[in-house]
Image (tube, rainbow, N blue to C red):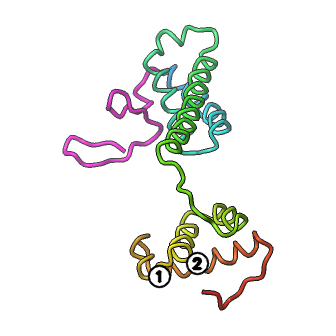
Amino acid sequence: MGKGAAGRVFALAGPTLIVGGRVVPVGDAEPEYVWFFRAEFPGVLRTVFLILHDRGRSEDVTQEAFIELFVHWRKVSRYERPEAWVRRVAVRKAVRALRRERMRAVLEREAFPEPGVDVPDVDLARGVRKLPVMQRSAVVLFYFEDRPVSEIAFILGISEGAVKVHLHRARRRLAELLGEEVDENAR
C-alpha cells in the first residue's frame, strides 16, 4: 500500500520495497535488480522462514535484506555470487532477530520475576501453560482468581458467551492433557 498525492491509500501491483520511507515498486529499479529480486526472493524467504519459523517476521527480515541489497546493488551486482551476499545478510538478520528475542525474554524474566505462586498441582500448572492464550487467561481468571464470567469478559474484551466457550474448551483440553474425564457439570 502507498499514499497518492491526495493522501489516498492505494495498492501497488507487484513487489515493492520501502526505501528511506518511500514505497518503491521493484519494477522502477534497474532491470537486473528486478530480475534478481524476482528470482531470489522466494528462496531467501524460505531460508529465513526455516530459521525463524514465523512467516511475518521472515517476510520482514527478507525484505530488510533485499532493501540492503537495493541500496548496495551497483557494488553487489558485480560480485561473483550476489545471491550468496543477500542470503548472508538475511541469515545474519534472522539470527540477530532470534538473539534479540531470546535476550528480551531473559531480561523480562529478570525484570519481572515470576511471583511465588503456590500452585496446588504442578501437572495442572503445566497443562494450563499449554493452553492457547485466551483459554489460559480465562482459566487463570476464573479458577485461580475466582472472578465472575462477566468480569472476565470485560478484562479480556470478549463476550460472556466467548468466555464460557474458552472455559469449556480449556476444561476439555486439560482433561485430555491430564488423562482425566471431562465433568460437564464442572464449574
14 to 112, vertically: above or below: above
Mark 2 surroundings within 10 Å by alpha-carbon count, few (fewer than 14), some (14 through 19), many (20 or more) = many
Kindly identify which residue carries mark 2: 167
Asked if labels 1 and 2 touch by Cβ distance under 8 angstroms, the answer is: yes
Check disc 2 and give the amino acid type: Leu
The label on residue 75 is none
Q: Is residue 154 left or right of residue 133?
A: left
What stretch of residues is rendered in magenta?
A: 1-30
Residue 42's place in the image compared with 29, above or below, is below
Q: Which residue is drawn at the image coordinates 54% and 42% (left, top)?
A: 105
Q: Specify the amino acid type for callout 1.
A: Val
Local crowd size for mark 1, using a 10 Å CA cut-off: few (<14), some (14–19), many (≥20): some
Can residue 31 be found in the magenta stretch?
Answer: no
Give SS at disc 1: helix
Quick one: 110 or 170, which is closer to the camera?
A: 110
Task: Please identify the residue farthest to the left as the structure is shown.
Answer: 6
- Image quadrant occupied by the N terminus: top left
Residue 130 location, x and y as percent? 66, 61
**Residue 180 falls left or right of residue 141:** right
Residue on which the image places disc 1:
149
Q: Position of residue 124 (x, y in %)?
A: 69, 68
Alpha carbons under labels 2 and 1: distance apart: 10 Å
Q: What residue sits 46% from the left and 11% below the top?
A: 74
Q: Residue at x 19, y 45 (%)?
A: 6
Which structural element holds mark 2?
helix
Q: Position of residue 40 (x, y in %)?
A: 61, 28
Residue 129, quarter of the rendered image: bottom right
